[in-house]
Amino acid sequence: MLRRVSELDLSGECQRLGVDLPKVLSVYNFHFWFNGSSAKIVLSLEPPAVASVGIDGLARVYAGEGLDRAELEERLVSVLGLREDPAEFYRLARSDPLLAPFASEWAGWRLRGTGLWWALVTAVCQQNASFRQGWRMLAKLVNRYGRGVELEGEGWVPLPPSPHDVLSDPGKLREAGLGYRADTVVRIAERFVRGEVPDEGELARMEAGEAERSLKTVRGVGSYTARLALALSARRYELPPIDRWVRALASRAYGVSGGEVESAWVNRWGRWSALAVVALTVALDAAPLREALARLEAGRLLPEPGKLSPSTLWSFALC
């Protein structure tokens, strides 16, 4: 059981920064980590530490022996995006043909971060997969491995499988539907166990291209996967994770050829390029490409209720 080691009231800080905590906690989250009123956020996997954060800003941190309370508190604040000022991103978005409505209605959203290991697994599961397929894989991974911890007074919380869990039973990756992606996850896990992967702090200090190259040394990790993982784990947004979906939408919206999309995207978004990609998936509900293009033509550029999407994922059970 993990004991409560800290309590924080983040409501004042969120209000001061204009952060919409319900949006931060709900987007790209599962029902077993967010129930509409509070979220469980994994701050450390080995050894485990978990924060329980309410939409009202009240937070509790749970951990075992050997973890520093102040470091965990700082980790939580960083994960929630409270150390980041995206004012420039929203300024750029307000005049963008893809994200202008999002900038108006969702200005309080911040990207909720995660550790590098789970960021890489998340990114691998998005390879050549629809939103539904990719996130079902992730939900099944958590379910199949069955890792979790008891929080004092708050009950059982499932945890992502660790690199050691994966290597001890790699067959569960295919049970979760990863297919060929399973081999890549195993290779990533081996690198983590051998201590051959830079941590988030090191990635934050590297030049963006160097950080991307350091992750791409794992076979099966390409630019898309590395860039998405950098955004989720280290808040490195300079390099956009461009896939077929983003390429088609940006080509239509910006009036450029598919081959010109990445340069046009970086020229428009600069150091916020990857954040703009993630925001676009939220704005268009990560809808299949044909539907997303139709919504672009119709000007329907905000999340729509009643369907499985990044903003409603938490209200669906995928496994």
Image: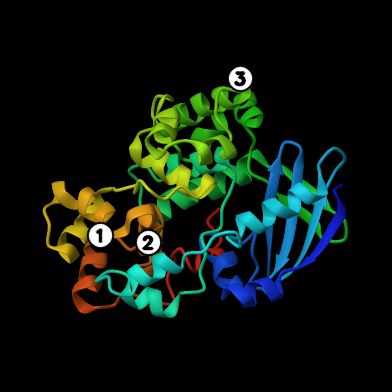
Which callout, 3 or 1, points to the residue nearer the camera?
3
Q: Quadrant of residue 64?
A: top right
Q: Secondary structure at mark 3?
A: loop
Name the quadrant containing residue 227.
top left
Along the line of sight, the residue nearer the viewer: 128 or 45 = 45
Q: Earlier in the sequence, mark 2 or mark 1?
A: 2
* Residue type beneath disc 2: Thr
Residue at the (71%, 69%) spot, across then down: 10
In the displayed structure, 242 sits above or below 248; it is above
Reading the chain from its start, which is encountered first: label 2 or label 3?
3
Kindly identify which numbered label has been placed on residue 281: 2
Residue type marked 1: Leu
Q: Nearer the viewer, residue 214 or 54?
A: 214
**Percent position (x, y) of residue 100?**
32, 75
Q: Identity of the amino acid at label 3? A: Arg
Q: Which mark is residue 239?
A: none
Q: Find the residue positioned furthest to the top.
A: 194
Q: Name the element at disc 2.
A: helix
Disc 2 to disc 1, how far (Cα)? 11 Å
Q: Position of residue 9 (x, y in %)?
A: 77, 70
SS under mark 1: helix
Report the residue at 59% width, 27% height from top: 192
- In the picture shown, does residue 295 fall above or below 219? below
Judge the density around disc 2: few (<14), some (14-19), many (≥20) Cα neighbours within 10 Å: some
Q: Is residue 176 visible?
A: no
